[in-house]
Image (spheres, helix red, strand yellow):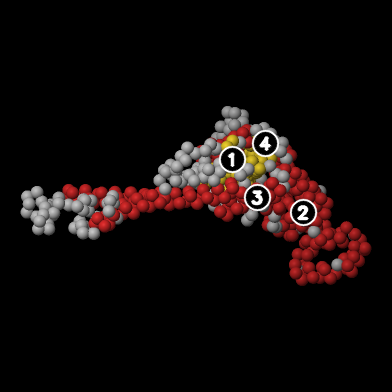
Amino acid sequence: MSRRPEPAQANDPVRHHLSPTLSLDIDPLIENPDTRIVVCCGSGGVGKTTTAAALGLRAAERGRKVVVLTIDPARRLAQSMGIDSLDNTPRRVKDVDDSAGGELHAMMLDMKRTFDEIVEAHADPARAAAILGNPFYQSLSAGFAGTQEYMAMEKLGQLRSRDEWDLIVVDTPPSRSALDFLDAPKRLGSFLDGKLIRVLLAPAKVGGRAGMKFLNVGMSMMTGALGKVLGGQLLKDVQTFVAAMDSMFGGFRTRADATYKLLQAPGTAFLVVAAPERDALREAAYFVERLAAEDMPLAGLVLNRVHGSGADRLSAERALAAAENLEDSRIVDQGDGKAGLRNSPDTYGSSESPARNVTDGGSPATEDGTGAAPEHPAADGDADAERSVDRLTAGLLRLHAERMQLLSREQRTRDRFTALHPEVAVAEVAALPGDVHDLAGLRDIGERLAAGRPELPETP
C-alpha cells in the first residue's frame, strides 16, 4: 500500500484537504497466493455483490481458481455472469479469459438446503428423516433469526475444507447490520446452549420411567406454561426436534468456532464496502472497529458510487453566480452593476450596451438622423438565439453547481471517516450511469478498483 501524492492544484477552491489517505492496492491482494478468502462486508445496498463479483472475475483472469459465494436474493450476480440461475452448487462462469490458467465459479447460498446438508451429513438416515420432516425444524431452517448468516459461515467452511479453489470471495448477507455476519454464529450457538434447549432436552437424556417422572413432576409447570404460549403441538415438535438434534448440537458449535478462527487467519482479508453517505460510512466505521477488536485482518475500504467531476476548478458558488448573470442580462459585465442601468432606455434583455447614442430630442439616433426606429429583423433573431444560448448555458452551470455540491458532501463524509481511521486504506469507485449486468461491466468495476485513482478530491 502506498500514500497518494499531494495534489498539484494547491490553490484549487475544491481541494481543501485534511490529510492524504492510504490507497488500497487491489491487484497485489487478489494475486497473492497466500490470500485464500476475501470477505466483502458492509451495510445493505452499497454494492457488495457487484464488488465481490468484480474481484472474483479480476482474480480469475489473473490466474486464480476462484469461487464467488453470494447471499444476494436479487440474483444480480447470476445475471451479470451470464448464468440462468445460481444455486447451492458452484457453477463455472463462461466467457472468462482463462489464458492465465484461472477459472471463475459462482454460487448462491440456499440457506435451507445448506441446513439440510448438515443434517444429512451428521445424522443416520432415520434420524435425518425425522429431523427434516419436523415442523419446527422446517421453520427454523427457513427463517430463524441469524440462520442465514450462520449458514453462510457453514458454507464458507465447507468450501475451504474442500481445498478446490485458490480463492473464495464471499458476499455477506444483506443484513440490517453488517455486524450480523459475525454475531450470528454466536447467537445460534447461544440458542443451542440456552436454558430452554437444555430443559427440553432433559427428559430425553434421563430416559425411561425416571425421565417420565422428571417430566411429570419437575417440568409440568414449565411445559404447561410453554404449551399455553407456544401451543401444545408446537411444544411437542420442539421437544422432538431437540431430542433428534441432540447429537448434532456440539458439531454446530465446533464448526462455528472453526470458521470463526478461519476468518481470523492470515489468509483471510476483509474488505468493507460502503457508499459515500453518512449512514453507510458510520456502519463501515463500526465494522472496522469490530474487526480490530476481533483480530480479524482488514484489507481496506471500498468506497463505491463516488461522484467526480473533470471541471472541479469551477466551484459551485462561481457556477451559480455565472448562471445568475446569464439569466439577468441587464447586469452582465456592467462595471457599475444595476446603478449604471437606472436611467438607461435599454429594454430588458437587450444585448446592446445601455450607453447608446441619443439625439438631442431624446430619441435614439439613426444613420439618417430622422430618429425613426431602425428595422433589423436579423438582429432580433440573433438576440433571441443569444438569449437561448444563455439560458442553456445557465442551466448547465446550475447542473454543474449541483454536482459540485454533491461532490463536496461526499468529500466531507469520506474525510470524517478517514480522520477517525487514518490507518484504513481506501479504493474509490466512480458512480456508473447504469447497473452492471454483464462481464464487461464487472471488468470495468475491477479496473476501477485496481486503478487506485481517487474520484473525490484529496484533503491536505
Number of the front mark, 4 or 3: 3
Mark pair 4, 3: CA separation = 21 Å
Q: Which mark is residue 22?
A: 1
Residue 96 lies in quadrant: top right
How far across and how far down the image is residue 249, in percent? 80, 52
Q: Amino acid at mark 3?
A: Phe
Of helix, strand and loop, which one carries label 1? Answer: strand
Q: Is residue 221 left or right of residue 292?
A: right
Disc 3 target residue: 287
Disc 4 target residue: 35
The residue positioned 71% from the left and 38% from the top of the image is 266
How far across and how far down the image is residue 178, in percent? 64, 52
- N-terminal of the pair, mark 3 or mark 1, is 1
- N-terminal of the pair, mark 3 or mark 2, is 2
How far across and how far down the image is residue 17, in percent? 52, 45
Q: Which mark is residue 189?
A: 2
